[in-house]
């Protein structure tokens, strides 16, 4: 899986509520092969747009709307909430997982925007931000500010 890959996990086991449901993700990289356990950093999106509208419980969150279109890998409107932490599964749980379907990749400009906004988020640790920075560099997306 490449940095910027959009995928749909058909039966994602959500650890927050114990339920299982389909989720859209954007792959931001991993912890690198020198780590003891290779951790992936996919960030999830939500199709529950009403939470981000006036009166919604996430209206003040920094977010970005991906609109469904013929050029978009998303098959429905989805919001990336930068105030939500990434999921941190073992990379091996993503590889060859029959419940995961890759839908396409985001362009470099969109990935740069995501990186910059993730770096401003308070929900990503410095370690994760450094791993994502390294993953972007390895993918050829260079010149990004190192996380502080």
Image: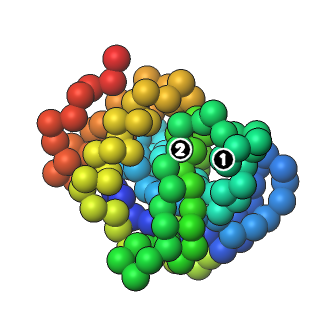
Name the one closer to the observer, 25 or 48.
48
Residue 10 position, x and y percent, is 66, 74
Say whether residue 95 is visible: no
Q: Which residue appears at 69% of the width and 69% of the height? A: 22
Task: Specify how the rendered protein is coloured.
Answer: rainbow
Local crowd at mark 2 within 10 Å, few (<14), some, or many (≥20)? some
How far, Cα to Cα, is label 1 from label 2?
Answer: 8 Å
Q: Which residue appears at 75% of the width and 44% of the height? A: 56
According to the image, label 1 marks what residue?
52
User: In the rendering, which numbered label is found on residue 63?
Assistant: 2
Q: Secondary structure at mark 2?
A: strand
Earlier in the chain: of badge 1 and badge 2, it is 1
**Vertical relation: 25 (above or below) 87:** below
Residue 136 position, x and y percent, is 27, 46
Local crowd at mark 1 within 10 Å, few (<14), some, or many (≥20)? some
Query: Which residue occupies the extreme top position in the image?
Result: 148
Residue contact between numbered discs 1 and 2, judged by CB atoms under 8 Å: yes
Q: Which residue appears at 32% of the width and 54% of the height? A: 110
């Amino acid at each position: 899986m490449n940095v910027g890959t959009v995928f749909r996990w058909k039966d994602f086991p959500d650890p927050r509520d114990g339920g299982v449901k389909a989720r859209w993700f954007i792959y931001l990289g991993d912890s690198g092969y020198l780590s003891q356990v290779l951790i992936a950093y996919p960030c999830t999106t939500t199709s529950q747009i009403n939470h981000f509208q006036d009166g919604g419980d996430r209206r003040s969150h920094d977010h970005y709307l991906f609109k469904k279109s013929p050029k978009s890998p998303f098959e429905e409107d989805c919001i990336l909430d930068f105030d939500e932490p990434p999921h941190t599964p073992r990379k091996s749980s993503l590889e060859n997982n029959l419940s995961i379907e890759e839908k396409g990749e985001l362009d470099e400009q969109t990935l740069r925007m995501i990186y910059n906004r993730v770096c401003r988020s308070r929900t990503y640790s410095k370690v994760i931000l450094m791993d994502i920075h390294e993953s972007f560099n390895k993918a050829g997306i260079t010149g990004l500010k190192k996380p502080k």
